[in-house]
Image: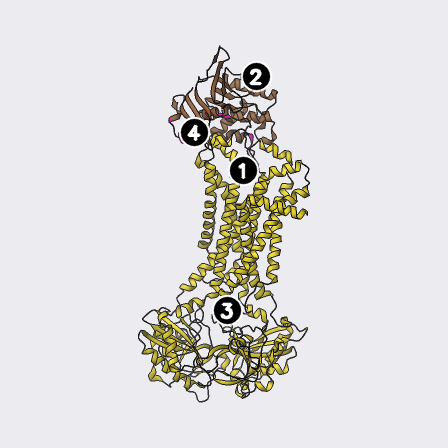
Amino acid sequence: MIELKNIERSYKTGYTETWVLRRIGLTIKEGEFVTVMGPSGAGKSSLLNVLALLDDGWLGEYWLGEKPAHKLNRKQRADLARQRIGMVFQSYHLLDDLTVAENIDLPLSYKSLPAKDRQGMVADILDRFKIVAKKDLFPSQLSGGQQQLVGIARAVVHAPALLLADEPTGNLHSTQAREIMELFCELNRQGTTIVQVTHSLENARYGSRIVELHDGWLTRDENLHAHSTEVGAK
Amino acid sequence: MNMLRDLHYAVRQLRRVPGFALTVILTLALGIGATTAIFTLVYDVMLRPLPFAQSDRIVNMEEIAAEWSNIYPTLPVSANHFALWQQHNRSFGSMAVMQQGSAPLGSEGRPTQVGVLAATPGIFSVLQVQPQLGRAFTVSEAQPGNEHVAILMHDVWREQFGSDPGIVGKTIRLSGFPYTVIGVMPQTFHMPAVQTIATIGDTNRPLPIGVLEPLAFSKERLAEEMGDLNYFGLGRLKPGVSVKAASADLDALQHTISANLPADEKATLSVAITPFQQQLVGKNRESLLILLAAVAGLLLVGCVNVTNLLLTRAVGQKQQMAVAAALGARRRELVRMALRETAVLAAAGGGLGILLASAIVPAMQRYLPSALDFRGSLHLNWAGAGCALLLAVVATLLAGAAPALMVSAIAPNEVLHTESRLASESRGTRSARRVLVGIEVAVSVALVLITGLLVTSLMKLMSVDRGFAAERTMTATVDLPMESYRDDQHRADFYREVLDRMDRLPGVEHAAVTSVLPLTGDSWGDMARVAGDARPVTQLPLESFRSVSPEYFSAIHLPLLSGQFFSRSDWGKNVALVSEKTAKTLWPRRDPVGQQFSRGDPEKGEKPFTVVGVVANARTISLAQPDPMMIYVPYWYRTEPVAGLVVRTRQLPSEMGDTIRQTIWSVDRNVPVPTVRALGSVVADSVANQRFEMDLLLLFAVSALFLAGLGIYGVITYSVVQRYREIGLRIALGAQRTTIYRLVLRDGMVPVTGGAAAGVALAFGLARIVSSLLFQVSPYDPVVATGAVCTLLVVGTAACLLPARRAASIEPMHALRTE
């Protein structure tokens, strides 16, 4: 599903260059549920941005399925992301002016899909996430957990093969966080590959694998259902 | 103390955002400066009382002859009727009639031409002024033979006589005659130009009045019961007498005059009495009001822009306000915080606006058409300054109140709450800003549309078929001293000699003399009686007469339709050419050549005129309308002291100016030649009024467009900044660059389109007033309306494109970085 080879990312700050990702090599198979952990500033979100094809400034090789993302231009990467990737954010990032249904419809509106098909897909996901009753409400009328539920529904409405989540439960209390994580497990069981970034070990245990970053280096890769692998710093 | 601290904070905050501060200050300065300048003009012309005691009691008196009212709605006053009014009226404290002209002043070398006002002695009590030195005219000085006394205006006394304190009693030469100076008017006295036959607002730029002389009527003139309608009448109403009552009083006298007219001069007479100031403003009232409305529109656009900019800034300061509120700041203090910046901006903008206005006013004076220039020099007065100050306060309130209230209403927790979602501006605020953009676009579209109409109108006026040619043609005016050129014979001899010498000049094709140069007004109206027509003189058709030399028609390329021009061989004969319109009216279905007519009230023993030819109709009195019936008589029949020369050349007309002057002076070096101009300039000057209005409106429209563009740009840029994360999210969710462009453009163009529609409606609503200023253009002209809307759409699109580009290049990774 995903193969990263020697991925590097740095930012220029004045005359110095700050490295946020160093020679990352990582393979994620289809159907895996991977958790990326590490302290603040370790490079977790940067790695997620690379995986989401939102970042253009990295070096190395990135294979998404059969597609060499490193050889694609910006537009081709955006097309690829639109087809295969869904994103969930810590701050939900729902648009205040749009209703629940309209927020979920947003990614579909950027594809050339007939309106009727889009309506059907939104209705399906509302039904699947059991939020049909809330479809006409605005984000400000929902609790944090409900808003994140809508955020996830929006991320998966176009049935992406890969779901990326950046601290999806960071703004939620524990009960709501558990519900969200169980929803992720459900999606994963249905075949969606998931990569989440979190600080919570409890949430990480819902996944099948943990990778850990420190100062941009990949320092640990642990399969929770098998033995752990320590990755030495190079 | 608090105020000083507020001022200190405000200045410190504004120094951090110099671009914003400068934009607001310049916008306010432009709006306030332009409005103050135009208000100064309108106030000076229309509202400020004339500088005479109880000036509201001074009225202009005109006559109405029902038989001629279709051509001349009002007529100047006749000496005969005036004498009766003066004797029998019960409504006026005093009255006077006068006639403005010009005359050469001095005799040594080349005399200067000065404006001369010949007035009956009553003028001093009508205007309630007295000379600063010497005395006013006496009644006996207004008798033929005693009238060679003069009162100098202050400027002439200073410039021509070095403010000689002993000038009273000295003799000066006016038109070659000796005049005794009996007085000097005070410096504060400025007499507006008085013109007759409704020439106010037309093209003649009369010389400022430099000398007052008594107007003396001969017995023959006083005996003319229906002739000599030549004088501008002014009267001072008795206290408590209304214009209506005075009209009724004089109408009764007119009725008596009508009843006693001889059978062949029967006319139904009445009077028209108009407050003097209203008469001076005349038909410029509409254009001044349009200018005032336009500049008020510009100020509105400026205020809306400033409001929008301040609103933008206030929204940006939400966090700061929320912190202040959380720390215990009360609503009053929040409002003060918000208003202190606005107050500083308004003060700076107002101050700069006054400076700008004080620079605009003198510049405007230079371009002021003569019709609006009856006050002397314009000065930015206290009324103007007060107006600017008032506007600054209003602008402050308008621009400051909305953001201040919005900011003061913020609940701190709301700020924190909205941070977790993607909105940092409430729907209400966004709608308010869209409405504001809509308003400024509406006003701008209306301004652009009205300006477009005036530009189209002026273009049509300038390209209308005038019927004569102005290329390679020079004109000159000549003012013959009466002393040396007492009668038609002497004057005709002078012109014949000048024309002979002109004809011999290399490069001259045709040289001619005319009583009135094309497009400089009308002068001699008279009736033509066709042989066999026995109607009373007042029922005869009225024609406009010109006395011209034979070459006049060739010099201005006025085509001959039938017959021939008169020539030197006709010297002394009463021959005439008529315009096609005259021919068709006087001799329908007959060949006019060879026909005879006489003047309605001919001199004793005068032979009838024989028509020798017919020339085409033209527009020589006003470009806006075809000439009335024209009759051209030869200059040997009648020649006025003031006349015009027309010289068609084979070379550049500008090279001929000095040659023409020298040629005239080679015949008589004492003849003033006040103006030498290309005929093209005379034509251009004839639309000076329209050009003045158009230029100002064009300036306002361009400023409004610029401000509207700036406003749209500011609002959309701010909107993009506010929607930074939202747009980043949309890109992250798959939106393409074109989608983002569309999103931003739609956001910007919705209020622009709405505003444009409202602007067209606004301009159409003003159609009734605007139409009076238009020539051959409908106020609903679809092409101009479409052009105005398209202009705003282009400006709107251009203003949206830069922020749209910025939006489309947002990096989602940055936009969505965890807060």
Instruction: From the image, tell me which residue sits under label 3.
Output: B370
Q: Identity of the amino acid at label 3?
A: Ser
Chain ID for label 1? Answer: B
Q: Identity of the amino acid at label 2?
A: Glu
> Which chain can be seen in yellow?
B
For label 2, the SS is helix
Q: Which mark is residue A202?
A: 2
Residue extent of the magenta highlight: A71-100
Question: Is label 4 on the same chain as label 1?
Answer: no
Q: Are marks 3 and 1 in contact (CB under 8 Å)?
A: no
Distance (Cα) linking label 3 and label 4 = 70 Å
Chain ID for label 3? Answer: B
Instruction: From the image, tell me which residue sits under label 4.
Output: A57
Mark nearer the viewer, 3 or 2 = 2
- Assess whether residue A75 is covered by the magenta stretch: yes
For label 3, the SS is helix
Mark nearer the viewer, 4 or 1 = 4
Q: Indicate the position of residue A139 as horizontal and vertical percent values.
A: 58, 30
For marks 4 and 2, the one nearer the N-term is 4
Instruction: From the image, tell me which residue sits under label 1.
Output: B722
> Which chain can be seen in brown?
A
